[in-house]
Image (cartoon, coloured by chain):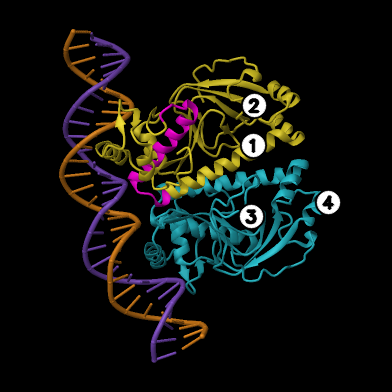
Chain colours: A yellow, B cyan, C purple, D orange
Amino acid sequence: MTMHDASIISQDCSDCPIRHRAVCAKCESDELTQLEEVKYYRSFQAGQTIVFQGDRMDFVASVVSGIATLTQTMEDGRTQMVGLLLPSDFVGRPGRNEAAYDVVATTDIVMCCFRKRPFEQLMAKTPHVGQRLLEMTLDELDAAREWMLLLGRKTAREKIASLLTIIARRDASLNLSGDANSLTFNLPLTRDAMADYLGLTLETVSRQVSALKKDGVIELKDKRTIHVPDMQILLSEAGDDADGGIF
Amino acid sequence: MTMHDASIISQDCSDCPIRHRAVCAKCESDELTQLEEVKYYRSFQAGQTIVFQGDRMDFVASVVSGIATLTQTMEDGRTQMVGLLLPSDFVGRPGRNEAAYDVVATTDIVMCCFRKRPFEQLMAKTPHVGQRLLEMTLDELDAAREWMLLLGRKTAREKIASLLTIIARRDASLNLSGDANSLTFNLPLTRDAMADYLGLTLETVSRQVSALKKDGVIELKDKRTIHVPDMQILLSEAGDDADGGIF
DNA sequence: CGGGGGGTTGATCTCCTTCAATCAACGTGG
DNA sequence: CCACGTTGATTGAAGGAGATCAACCCCCCG
């Protein structure tokens, strides 16, 4: 795998932007010290494949900044995105040597990598890494199951609305904009990547985005910047308006 | 929730059929003793709903025998099965109070339940339950992601073939029949449940099963007993013929 | 005998895919 | 600076896979 010169950033864990959310979130200072000894940073450019399905993996990693995707591919070329990796998300599986999915950088990305053997040994000896990883994995399992409902039962329009909801919700939880019911956010995916995620073709994605625009559910500043005038309407379009609190 | 008289079976963990695969698999004797103190058995009949989405859950559990399903429902009634629970599989999430999915018994089923609070405390104090649960959750996450590929990208025929492959594979790993390439197994799901799992309608399921039969890929002894003359053919119909060893 | 659950099959419809043309934005080299 | 290719996106027309609506079968059980 060629990698366009991974810039090696030296950084102290205590300054790390994902310190409180990543796999190391529950670590105490001695555990953190041990992690620090086996960690190194790698950077990738947007579009680069970080890991190929079937590759040998000698590390696990956390996303520090940027976005990546997990994708599965069939022999005839059909692909399905099975995960979206945001900052603090974890890549790789302790106890496994081969990558199960393609990992592709959607934006420029920085990863905090840990050599696999020492990481596994740390997990066996001290509890907090494993505990945190269990929490994160359970969350991912919930997300995967929600996505199964989307893939199996939702219409194209509902799929688009659901995806926008998820991105919007994540964005809102960071930016905490004053206006609770309308918001604007950046869509970090191409039409093709959206199709890959939603189990659709890119043409259908384009059509449904246009339809939502025509119906006033969303507005497009440019093709990647989306304004939602009324979040409740988008939520009801998504089909799953559990509507519990903050969206 | 009414429960048709859960027969209370008293059983020693050392005799348990799932002792080596369930969440307790890695426990040492002292941990097992603690688990044994907070465990109790419950039985359910085929068709019974064990837990309703949104219900308060004061226990977690392992499936001892029988089969159950995890199902998500949209307000308008559309449903999607998001998990199949087989013996040794785990139900519930430590740290969560509300059930995220409907849990429905497909066959008569026996569950080994643990009161949630003590179970969580045991997880916090000793490592082996958490470690095993992490392994199992990672496996489930992989399965969920494989299912996302199926739901998003496979044709109806491939979906059916994939489901049969999974059931057949599981059956073969238990029964270890002599003939490596042909086998017969019982299909524990109704057409409706299959549709629910595969993101199809029951009519489409029925048609595709008939088509596979007409094409000689499978034979039906009765409507729930399936004979596969050549497993390789079924695998290629499923689309994902990684074909690594034992199917 | 009636009735209901599970299953199959047929006819029709429709939503999404497929194939294709077009466009805008952007960079690159002549 | 313009011609050209590329990449991402939109839109149209046609076709098809699966959904929907409906009839009917089989078998068990009360």
SS under mark 2: strand
- Disc 1 to disc 4, how far (Cα)? 26 Å
**Rendered-image quadrant of the C terminus of chain A:** top left
> Mark number for residue A98?
none
Residue B235 spot, x, y in % from top left: 48, 55
- Disc 1 to disc 2, how far (Cα)? 14 Å
Residue type at mark 2: give it: Phe
Name the residue that disc number 2 marks: A114
The chain carrying label 1 is A
For the point 54% across and 37% down, which residue is it?
A: A54
Name the residue that disc number 4 marks: B29
Question: Was residue A173 drawn as part of the magenta stretch in this picture?
Answer: yes
Residue A77 visible to the viewer: no
The answer to whether C7 is drawn above or below residue B60 in the figure is: below
Name the residue that disc number 1 marks: A133
Q: Image check: A174 left or right of A188?
A: right
Residue type at mark 1: give it: Leu
Pair 3/2: label in front: 3
Name which of mark 1 and mark 2 comes first in the sequence: 2
Q: Image check: A93 left or right of B200?
A: right
- Respond whether the residues carrying marks 3 and 2 are from the same subunit: no
- Respond whether the residues carrying marks 1 and 2 are from the same subunit: yes
